[in-house]
């Protein structure tokens, strides 16, 4: 005797429809993602012989990687980029969101303006920033009579990239945070007003706890995408720039190793490492959120 | 007395709010403005010290130079086709799968949904080398197909539309069923139209992402005629490394279509992002 109940005709028909309707997506995901993921994992233990042929070499790629100063520098650059962009970026986004949430005229206009970089390809955006930051003729140096090599000085270039990254992401994060702020019921503020709580007290006791779940989502998303940063740095700093090693992120190194140098085994090891790093950071975030994210109301 | 001082401090807060927003808006707009101004300058004009803010004349020479060195017509077409196909596939397949995951009972549902979640967790770069090798093996490098390839299905879209279908009461589907619709009809005729705002959001999300994507088009289509606007710009950067007026003109040309769409559909863009981001 089987423990299963025999499916009715209707239920069986429903099941068939279920399978048919998920089939394109699932087959696609298996071919486009699951299988490639396994291949990348395997390739990270292989040497690429060219033309897609691989030879198993065990942990050699990882050993080479961990002994390579350029790799460690890229790892640090990636983390440094996150440190420079994420806290400041999220702070400014929250500020913009709060300002937009106040009773201001032209709210829609300001929101659209802040959001503008989102609809522009990073490749196009960075082009004008390179011009603004140009050391000889750039408007920034000229305005302040400075002679800073924003893009070629290895000590400054990361800050330059961070500024562009923050500028690009502010509107996007602010729109998400604004949605969170708008969900806070006005009655809390009215009650606080009656109790005589000032604006600052209201911010720390109502706004911040109530918006913390959205803040957490934004933080996780921003961190994940910052750890994968590539296009912005690639466009700002070409691979002939002497300051490249000071700004090269893991994904930039991955691109150069895999598609410029053709070391796809080594490149795969770098990308696996990056995924592990993102995983670790995300787990830390999820553990840490219990201390500050408020899911109560 | 007290009320008037409160009114005054309120006024000050309002002024500060406007000042801060205005300053922010200037910082956001300035790069675009500077791009437009520079695109009409000659090279010598752009390198003047002290800088000349406004170009001496409005001229299109830089645009002509940019168009002469990059096949912009092809790039527009490639980008547009990539976006259109990715959107069609993402919306069609994700709607079907999202509906099935939300509303139908079938064996293996949880495992299959696990595959969807797994793909969402992994960064897209982890798939890039094998995906490129597949495209190369099929002999499909330097085609529109290659540009669309990684976007044929969308795990995020499936997840996102599943949420949308879960928000629709079961009774609606059951009513359609009692009216003699089969599962497909009740999905296609009744449920799918109800998710239009989510579909719009997914469309915006897919389009903006595909438009900005740089690594994949750079890797898979090396032929200048098959490049997207993003990867083409990266090439232009190499050719005119110091001729900023031409670079600005090229960037403007690349940005224009999406910015124009944005100006017309601002609300849909912003709400789309607010919806997809708030997952």
Image (spheres, coloured by chain):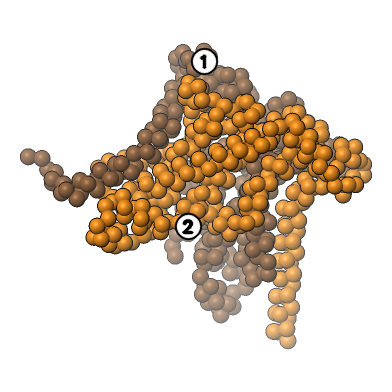
Q: x, y percentage for residue A98?
A: 62, 63
Q: The chain shown in brown is which? A: A
Q: x, y percentage for residue A96?
A: 65, 59
* Residue A23 appears in the rendering: yes
Disc number for residue A209: none
How would you rate the neighbour count of disc 1 (Cα within 10 Å): few for under 14, some for 14-19, many for 20 or more?
A: few
A150 displayed left or right of B52:
left
Q: Residue at x 65, y 65 (%)?
A: A107
Label 2 lies in what chain?
B
How would you rate the neighbour count of disc 2 (Cα within 10 Å): few for under 14, some for 14-19, many for 20 or more?
A: some
Q: How many marks?
A: 2
Label 1 lies in what chain?
A
Q: Is residue A189 above or below residue A11?
A: below
Q: Secondary structure at mark 1?
A: loop
Q: Residue at x 82, y 47 (%)?
A: B37
Quadrant of the drawing holding the N terminus of chain B:
bottom right
B119 displayed left or right of B42:
left
Q: Residue at x 31, y 55 (%)?
A: B186
Q: The chain shown in orange is which? A: B
Q: Which residue is mark 2?
A: B197
Q: Nearer the viewer, residue A273 or B158?
A: B158
- Asked where in the image residue A235 lies, by quadrant, the reply is top right
Q: x, y percentage for residue B234?
A: 68, 32
Q: Secondary structure at mark 2?
A: helix
Q: Nearer the viewer, residue B164 or B50?
A: B164
Disc number for residue A51: 1
């Amino acid at each position: 005797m089987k423990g299963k109940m025999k499916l009715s005709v209707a239920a069986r028909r429903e099941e068939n429809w279920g399978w048919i309707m998920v089939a394109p997506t699932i087959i696609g995901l298996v071919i486009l993602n699951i299988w490639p993921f396994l291949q990348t994992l395997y390739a990270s233990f292989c040497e690429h012989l060219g033309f897609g042929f691989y030879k198993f070499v065990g942990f050699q790629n990882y050993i080479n990687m961990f002994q390579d100063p350029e790799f460690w520098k890229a790892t640090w650059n990636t983390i440094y980029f996150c440190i420079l962009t994420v806290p400041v970026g999220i702070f400014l986004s929250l500020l913009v969101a709060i300002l937009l949430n106040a009773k201001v005229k032209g709210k829609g206009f300001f929101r659209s303006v802040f959001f503008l970089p989102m609809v522009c390809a990073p490749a196009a955006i960075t082009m004008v920033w390179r011009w603004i930051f140009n050391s000889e003729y750039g408007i920034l140096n000229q305005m302040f009579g400075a002679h800073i090599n924003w893009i070629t000085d290895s000590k400054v270039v990361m800050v330059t990239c961070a500024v562009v990254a923050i500028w690009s992401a502010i509107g996007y994060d602010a729109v998400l945070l604004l949605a969170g702020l708008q969900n806070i019921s006005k009655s809390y503020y009215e009650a606080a007003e009656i109790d005589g709580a000032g604006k600052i007290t209201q911010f720390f006791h109502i706004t911040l706890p109530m918006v913390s779940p959205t803040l957490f989502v934004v933080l996780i998303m921003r961190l994940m995408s910052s750890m994968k940063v590539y296009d912005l740095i690639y466009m700002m700093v070409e691979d002939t720039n002497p300051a490249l090693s000071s700004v090269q992120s893991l994904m930039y190194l991955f691109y150069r190793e895999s598609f410029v140098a053709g070391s796809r085994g080594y490149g795969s090891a770098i990308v696996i490492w990056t995924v592990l790093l993102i995983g670790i950071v995300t787990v830390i975030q999820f553990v840490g959120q219990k201390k500050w994210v408020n899911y109560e109301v | 007395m007290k009320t008037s001082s409160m009114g005054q401090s309120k006024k000050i807060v309002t002024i500060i709010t406007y000042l801060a927003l205005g300053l922010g808006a200037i910082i956001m707009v300035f790069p675009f403005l500077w791009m437009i101004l520079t695109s009409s300058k000659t090279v010598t004009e752009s390198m003047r010290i002290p800088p000349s803010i406004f170009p001496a004349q409005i001229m299109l020479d830089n645009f002509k130079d940019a168009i002469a060195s990059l096949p912009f017509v092809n790039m527009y077409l490639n980008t547009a086709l990539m976006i259109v196909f990715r959107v069609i596939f993402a919306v069609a397949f994700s709607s079907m799968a999202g509906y099935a995951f939300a509303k139908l009972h079938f064996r293996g549902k949880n495992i299959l949904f696990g595959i969807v979640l797994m793909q969402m967790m992994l960064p897209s770069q982890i798939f890039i080398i094998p995906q490129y090798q597949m495209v190369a093996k099929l002999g499909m490098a330097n085609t529109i197909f290659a540009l669309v390839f990684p976007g044929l299905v969308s795990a995020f879209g499936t997840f996102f539309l599943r949420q949308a279908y879960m928000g629709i009461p079961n009774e609606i589907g059951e009513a359609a069923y009692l009216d003699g619709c089969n599962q497909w009809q009740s999905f296609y005729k009744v449920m799918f139209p109800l998710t239009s705002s989510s579909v719009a959001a997914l469309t915006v999300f897919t389009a903006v992402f595909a438009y900005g994507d740089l690594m994949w088009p750079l890797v898979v289509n090396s032929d200048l005629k098959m490049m997207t606007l993003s990867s083409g710009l990266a090439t232009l950067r190499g050719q005119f490394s110091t001729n900023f007026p031409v670079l600005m003109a090229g960037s403007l040309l690349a940005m224009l279509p999406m910015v124009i769409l944005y100006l017309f559909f601002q609300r849909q863009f912003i709400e789309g992002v607010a919806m997809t981001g708030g997952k």
